[in-house]
């Protein structure tokens, strides 16, 4: 991550993924499951077109399917959290995946984080707790649920990155991403059936939003993540969106007039300090 190209990619990915919450807020009346499905399905469709020459030369593995399952869960939870909570809170709690990648590496990969990594874990969890309980303008019950869903989406993203780190060692980006997005869309489709959601009930304006979500936050933003995890610690890659809460909050304030409570600011600052310590001393 110290070379110039990696920092440029980091910045591009940050802007790209930050735009996702704005689109979800704009289509607040559209089902989160519908938004998530079409984002993944269209992203997979575009990736298959871009990589058609290798369509028959690669067979997806069970690990890619599992990673796609986690990605589908991630987007369903994140989109719903944005609709129930504020953009700032959902974006912040949706970027604490480094906490869970660290926990996984500690218990299952025999990784031994430093004292500062553990200190960072404490700060990240304490700050996230403050954000969850902070007062807001929306209904308290829905905010707490939305914030908890955002934490859940971070757990799911940690699963995507941990598995993706192992898979990407031997698989190209195009082959990995197209099947990852496809299996994510299949997962969301099954969820839609279970929750009786009609994912085909949308208008032209909503479909334009689906295409944007597929092209910018996904093909640009997430593909950069999956490109980097081949050679970089998954905890570090998981922390690429550290600036997302700030960028997303600015957009929330500008486009929707959403303010951020002092408790959320304090909790967010503590969380970001904790995440920085995890990244700085865990790679």
Image (tube, rainbow, N blue to C red):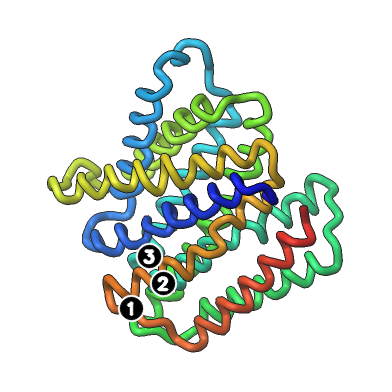
Gap between marks 3 and 1 measured at Cα: 12 Å
- The tag earlier along the polypeptide, 3 or 2, is 3
Q: Secondary structure at mark 1?
A: loop
* Residue at image location 50% in from the left, 81% down from the top: 264
Residue 190 spot, x, y in % from top left: 37, 39
Left or right of 14? Residue 23 is: left
Pointers 3 and 2 in contact (CB under 8 A)? no
* Residue at image location 63% in from the left, 78% down from the top: 270
Which label sits on residue 258? 1
* Residue at image location 61% in from the left, 37% down from the top: 164
Residue 78 spot, x, y in % from top left: 43, 58
Residue at the left extreme of this rendering:
203
Residue 109 spot, x, y in % from top left: 80, 45
Gap between marks 2 and 1 measured at Cα: 8 Å
Residue at the top extreme of this rendering:
56
The residue pinned by badge 3 equals 82
Pointers 2 and 1 in contact (CB under 8 A)? yes
Corner quadrant of residue 85:
bottom left
Left or right of 119? Residue 132 is: left
The residue pinned by badge 2 equals 249
Residue 225 or 155: which is nearer the viewer? 225
Q: Secondary structure at mark 2?
A: helix
Above or below, 282 relative to 85: above
């Amino acid at each position: 991550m110290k070379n110039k190209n990696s920092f440029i990619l980091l910045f591009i990915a940050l802007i790209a993924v930050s735009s996702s919450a704005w689109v979800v807020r704009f289509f607040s009346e559209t089902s989160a499951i519908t938004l998530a499905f079409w984002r993944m399905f269209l992203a997979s469709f575009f990736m298959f077109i871009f990589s058609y020459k290798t369509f028959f030369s690669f067979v997806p593995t069970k690990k890619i399917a599992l990673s796609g399952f986690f990605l589908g869960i991630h987007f369903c939870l994140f989109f719903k959290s944005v609709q129930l909570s504020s953009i700032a809170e959902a974006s912040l709690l949706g970027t604490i995946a480094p906490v869970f990648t660290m926990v996984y590496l500690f218990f299952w990969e025999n990784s031994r984080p430093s004292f500062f990594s553990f200190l960072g874990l404490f700060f990240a969890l304490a700050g996230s707790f403050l954000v969850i309980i902070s007062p807001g303008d929306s209904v308290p019950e829905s905010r707490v649920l939305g914030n908890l869903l955002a934490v859940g989406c971070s757990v799911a993203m940690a699963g995507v990155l941990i598995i993706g780190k192992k898979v990407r060692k031997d698989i190209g980006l195009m082959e990995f991403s197209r099947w990852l997005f496809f299996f994510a869309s299949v997962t969301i489709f099954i969820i839609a059936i279970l929750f009786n959601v009609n994912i085909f009930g949308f208008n032209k304006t909503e479909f334009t939003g689906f295409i944007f979500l597929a092209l910018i936050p996904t093909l640009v933003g997430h593909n950069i993540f999956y490109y980097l995890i081949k050679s970089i610690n998954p905890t570090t890659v998981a922390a690429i969106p550290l600036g997302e809460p700030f960028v997303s909050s600015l957009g929330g304030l500008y486009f929707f007039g959403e303010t951020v409570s002092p408790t959320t600011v304090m909790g967010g600052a503590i969380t970001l300090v904790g995440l920085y310590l995890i990244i700085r001393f865990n790679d």
